Image: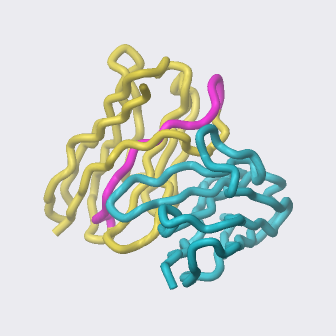
Chain colours: A yellow, B cyan
Amino acid sequence: QVQLVESGGGVVQPGKSLRLSCAASGFTFSSYGMHWVRQAPGKGLEWVAVVWYDRSREYYADSVRGRFTISRDNSKNTVYLEMNSLRPEDTALFYCARDICTGGCCYSFDYWGQGTLVTVS
Amino acid sequence: DIQITQSPSSLSASVGDRVTITCRASQSINRNLSWYQQKAGKAPNLLIFAATSLQSGVPSRFSGSGSGTDFTLTISSLQPEDFAAYYCQQSYSSPYTFGQGTSLEIK
C-alpha cells in the first residue's frame, strides 16, 4: 500500500534552516510528482511546492519562493523540502502528498503523509 | 494568483440531510477543481477531482459539479462519519490554492 512518512520537523529559531524529508513506499515513486502542503495550527491548507517526477519542473507558493527548495532523490524514494530564513509564520504541520497523475502533474493530491510539525520560535 | 472563495465557513446539519458546499474561483479554471475531507487530527483525503470525478473508494453520496468559476460539493445523505472539514482546491495554475474550508458540524 502507498505510504508517505515525513520527518525532520522540530523547533527552530527565526532565520534558521531546516530540512524535511518524506520517504515513499508502495508505488513507483519515480513516476509521480510530489508536493508539500502545510497547515498552520487551527488554520486551513496551503500548498507549498511541487517537483515533477523527473525533476524537470518545480513550482512554489509566493510565500516561500526564494526561501524554500523542493528536491527529490528517485534512487531513495524520497522528496525533500529545504527551508531557509524561517519565519514565525512558517509554523505549521507540513504534509507531503502524491500527485494523482503519472508522467506529469495534475496538481491534485491522492495520498498524504501524516505530517511533520515545524515550529519557528 | 487565482483566489478561491469557499462558503459557508461552517455548517450545522443532521444525519440524513442533504448538504452543499460551494467554491468560486476568481477566474475560469475550467474543471480543474478538487475536494478534500479532513477529520480532526488526520491528513486530508481526496474526495473529488476534475470537478466531478469520484476518487476510488469514496462513497457515492459525495458528488461534485460545476465548471468555469462556480463549483459545488454535495453530500446527498449525511452520515455520522461525514462530520469533518472540507476544502476545495484549484489545480489550474500555480500557486495551487485551497479554499478557506468548511467545518461541517452536527446539529
Say which residue appears at 49% left-offset and 18% top-offset. A28
Say which residue appears at 76% left-offset and 53% top-offset. B51
Q: Quadrant of residue A108?
A: top right
Identify whether A25 is placed above or below A18.
above
Pick out the residue farthest to the top.
Answer: A75
Q: Would residue B94 be counted in the magenta stretch?
A: no
Identify whether A37 is placed above or below A56.
below
Identify whether A87 is placed above or below A65.
below
Q: Quadrant of the N terminus of chain B?
A: bottom right
Q: Identify the main secondary structure in magenta.
A: strand
Judging depth in this view, the residue of A36 and A5 nearest the camera is: A5
Query: Which x, y percent locates residue A30?
Result: 49, 19
Judging depth in this view, the residue of B72 and A18 nearest the camera is: B72
Counting labels gives: 0
Identify whether A66 is placed above or below A97.
below
Q: Is residue B31 left or right of residue B107?
A: right
Judging depth in this view, the residue of B11 and A18 nearest the camera is: B11
Judging depth in this view, the residue of B69 and B7 nearest the camera is: B7
Say which residue appears at 54% left-offset and 82% top-offset. B10
Query: Which x, y percent locates residue A100?
Result: 60, 36
Q: Quadrant of residue B11?
A: bottom right
Q: Would residue A96 be counted in the magenta stretch?
A: yes
Query: Which x, y percent locates residue B3?
Result: 66, 70
Q: Is residue A99 left or right of residue B62?
A: left
Say which residue appears at 28% left-offset and 66% top-offset. A87
Span highlighted in magenta in the image: A90-104
